[in-house]
Amino acid sequence: MSKFPFYKQLDGMDCGPTCLRMIAKYYGKTFSVQQLREQSYIQRTGVNLLGISEAAASIGLRATGIRTSMDKLKQQSKLPCIIHWNQEHFVVLYKIEKKKGKTWFYIADPAYGLLKYEEQELKKCWISTTQGGIEKGIAMLLDVTPQFYEAEPIKYEKLS
């Protein structure tokens, strides 16, 4: 697997749009963070899952928000996906790998870079609730639709 595309967020509110930008690049399209910010209805406090979902739809990605267990995340999730981090941030989970008896999770964190976490470390940052005795976290699964390949990036003029 080649290196996952990484973009650094421009400010503290850009994590969601920047995650979408990385995933779009992974699938072969380049969109500006400005376009994705506008489509996600970013506010002073950042963006929420609904805003990310609407921005995803605007570029031809079908988003499904789920609250899921670690086991289901490992077994059933299509990667890359966006996960809610420390209940205040969004990151991209792009690879899960078993190596030497451990499960490793590869994260593209728009604030810090490409990172690798062991399962217990990831759980500390991702798990947000317990339902029926099962720890769960929030993820947004993204599927490419035919509209993704037809979507045109908006060209913005640079200020001099």
Image (cartoon, helix red, strand yellow):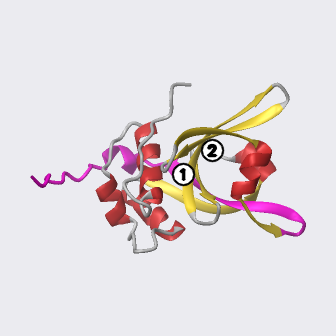
Towards the viewer: 79 or 92: 92
**Crowd tier of the residue under label 2, counting other residues whose Cα lies within 10 Å: few below 14, some 14–19, many 20 or above:** some
Q: Amino acid at mark 2?
A: Lys
Towards the viewer: 137 or 56: 137
View extreme (right): residue? 133
From the top left corner, tell me how far across and down residue 5 is, in percent: 45, 36
- Residue name at image x 60 percent, y 62 percent: 65
Compared to 141, does 44 lie above or below? below
Image quarter of the N terminus: top right
Q: What residue would you read off at disc 2?
A: 78
From the top left corner, tell me how far across and down residue 123 is, in percent: 76, 53
Give SS at disc 2: loop
The answer to whether residue 125 is seen in the rendering is: yes
Q: Amino acid at mark 1?
A: Leu
The answer to whether residue 75 is seen in the rendering is: no
Displayed quadrant of residue 103: top right
Compared to 62, does 95 lie above or below? above
**Crowd tier of the residue under label 1, counting other residues whose Cα lies within 10 Å: few below 14, some 14–19, many 20 or above:** many
Compared to 95, does 134 lie above or below? below
Displayed quadrant of residue 133: bottom right
Looking at marks 2 and 1 on the same chain, the residue that comes earlier in the sequence is marked by: 2
Q: What residue would you read off at disc 1?
A: 142
View extreme (left): residue? 160
- Residue name at image x 48 percent, y 63 percent: 53
Residue extent of the magenta highlight: 131-160
Asked whether, in this view, residue 27 is left or right of residue 153, the answer is right
Magenta stretch: residue 150 in it? yes
* Total marks placed: 2
From the top left corner, tell me how far across and down residue 112 is, in percent: 51, 46
CB of mark 2 within 8 Å of CB of mark 1? yes
